[in-house]
Amino acid sequence: MRDYSAESGQLRAICKGLLASGAVELVLAWTSGPGLTGREAMIAKGADQLIDRIVWSPFCTSSIATLIKRNRKALEGKNIGIVVKDCDRQALNVLLQEYVIKKENVVIIGVRCDGLASALMFPDATMASKVVSDEKGVQVDGKEVAWEDFGFNACLSCRYDSMSADHVVGEYARKKQVTELPHLKRLSGLSLSGRKEHFDALFGRCIRCYACREVCPVCACIECAIDPGESSITPRTTPLEKTSVAGWACRGREPSENAVFLMTRAMHMAGRCVRCGWCERACPAGIPLMELLDIVNENVLRVYKYEAGKDPAAPPFLASFSDDDPDDSGGAPH
Amino acid sequence: MSPIRISVEGLERIFGGLKDHRVLLPSGSGKKGEYIELTVAGRLPRECGDHTKPSAPPKNIIFPANETLLSYKLNIDGSIEVAQPEIGITKTILFGTPPCDSASFRVLDAALTKDIPEPFYTKRRENFGVIGMACSRAGKSCFCRSVGLSPVSEAGADLMAYPDGDDFIIKNVSGRLDMLWTLIEKSGEMVSEEAFEPVRARFDIPVENYKFSAERLVDAIEKRFTDPYWTEFSSRCVSCGICTYLCPTCHCFDILDVETDERSGTRVRTQDTCQFPEFTGETSAHNPRKERYTRQRQRVLHKFLYFFRNHGMMMCTGCGRCIRYCPVDINIAEGVMKLGGTQ
Amino acid sequence: MTVFEPRIVAFICNWCTYAAADLAGVSRLQYPPNVLNIRVMCSGRVNPMMIIRAFARGADGVLVSGCHMGDCHYIKGNYYAKRRLLVLKSLLTGLGIEPERFRVTWISAAEAVDYQRTMTEMTENVRKLGPLTLFSKDRQVALESCAGSEVV
């Protein structure tokens, strides 16, 4: 039985210590409230109100690693402590691989994660509620919900079962053993035209809010390749240059343009997606994005034997090759 | 006109008999929800509440996310063909929206049909009617009462339906659906005020979250334009625009020309969002709202201050979608309460 | 009766496949005119976004062809291309796009006959499959909707 108030207490002590000793200038962690939600925050020394609300529980559903890309300027050159659950820990490795952050600037505080839960299932809970979990599910003030009933695809098919970090909090209570991703199994059971119909409908729902891109911890490009928006335009940009800013996907929300965005993003995630699942949770149109991403993720893992975020010193997947690369695509999703 | 009691089946029969009409209703809830035709759904919904609201707002029915304004083609002989779609011909009735969604049409009408009428919305609106339904369950992010509405508010509805067992009690609110009302009157039976009141009272439920009075906070908020709280409020924002896309009253749009090839293309109107930095990008590359907090501030002030001053009604209807679906938990009701000084 | 004429876009590398196309030309080898060749300096230059966008803009089939492994003019370009494009192919088939619509081939400068055969096969295979609807459906709807029929 995992007691999250105890684990939060340990986490708080570690963060407080790091800030007090000056080892880090900022701690990036979840803070509690309102209710069960954990909200990301950047906490400096002296911000005692925030430090005292540092929390860790299955309701910390966001990825702290996204704070790095969102606050590039503010964090540049600073030493930071960052609290990461398993998938975020892998995302950090991807960011290290790609020189978005430097190892000497980061103290990694890992929290072992059994999966995430939705606070919506406990509408009466408050910040003071007792949160515990075991291999079966999550209990809040005695009310239990099984892991499967939260329906977070990415968590139920998570494979991460070890945490290496500068500090580690918590022990795994749930054994993760997934050999076949259920949503991919469903997809490969469909015929080609069945799959086309399925994705046709999904591409039509996309409203191009780009929430999936914004909440993704590894979508960290300063200027997005697919939709650079205005980021490349300065007062020195000539009118001719403005008209030729690459617009890979038209701004209109037609299925073809949505498909360009979604498929390109899936390709850009090859060997980088850590399967945190936040894109799917954030999507306002309920598009099962993990289905799309896992087609590529499984191909990279099974056929090329490359694990995203495993080794920060490894060359990025798409920026390297091997003599053993197969000559065919390895077929449909497994 | 007194309210009319009609059975659910009776109303379904009337709808089934309407020629040249389509009846849309919310189906499914949350992210999987959508608005589908009664002929597809088969049955009318017998209740509505936060638990039956689709994440997509009903504004998309007459203010689509993506709409073709015209198509053009340059022929080999140099002549140009321009074609425009015919719009708003099919009479459409939306049945079963909660008051927060019905009221959104009152807001959209004020914004898009007064002063300079937006022709596409106005045309569609002429043939579009709303049958709102009293709300039976508020959700954790609802706050309709704080913006001048309630689970029994009839604002924006042309007819209002109050579920009662196997019947609805229908009230004629605006007179725009008189033709349909006549059919309902013929088919149902009149209900006295005394008999109607207890049914109505059942839906006059409290809404416990975010209790404030937006009208009373307007002056206080206006004075806090430069308040440092805005930065804190938007600190987690990722400018995805979900708050505006799912908002039932947001109506900003962008117009783009989409080339099919060098000789032809379409002009498309898409919903736009004030949360994307490009929204205020100027030709000189100057952008008055480059920082995120300026964009969130604009959104909140538009909803709770500017629109109220210009039109006398809150632009926000308290539906709570922006709170529920924000991927980083930004809460406009919390923000307004903090700025207005009631928290 | 109109026959469906597929639109195929081919990204062919300057040093190998493009040269093979040239050789096919001077040798008067016949193949269908459905292929739009785009010369790139190396197959490694081909960005998956180009392929995705080609499909989105109306291509019914896309081909990428470069030098044989070990023979790349830039030494390693085709190795990167092979990995990248085959991952893309797994994505496309995962989405339901028939594998015959996207092909990756390696054709050297002398292999004009292979070039001819590849282009002919590709055209005929895609012709059998018909137009690609995953992307272009909405464009057809948008254009049809302006031909006087109603968009509500």
Image: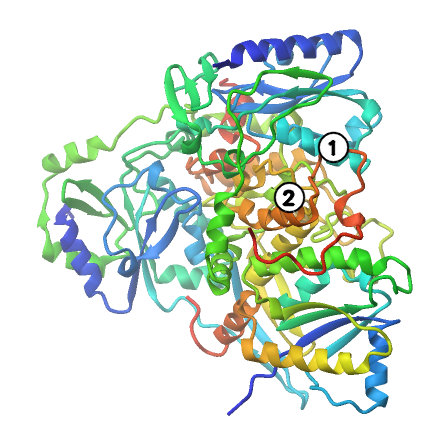
Q: Quadrant of residue A160?
A: top right
Assess whether mark 2 and mark 1 are in contact (beta carbons under 8 angstroms).
Answer: no
Which residue position is annotated with label 1? A93
Identify the residue at image location x=23%, y=53%. Answer: B43
> For the residue carrying disc 1, how many other residues have a C-alpha within 10 Å: few (<14), some (14-19), or many (20+)?
many
Query: Which amino acid, by three-letter code, is at mark 2?
Result: Arg
Of helix, strand and loop, which one carries label 2? helix
Residue C135 at x, y = what percent?
57, 65
Q: Quadrant of the C terminus of chain C?
A: bottom left
Residue C88 at x, y = what percent?
67, 57
Identify the residue at image location x=45%, y=54%. Answer: B60
Letter of the chain that mark 1 sits on in the rendering? A
Query: Which amino acid, by three-letter code, is at mark 1?
Result: Asn
Which residue position is annotated with label 2? A213
**Is residue A2 in view from this perspective?**
yes
Residue placed most toward the observer, A88 or A47:
A88
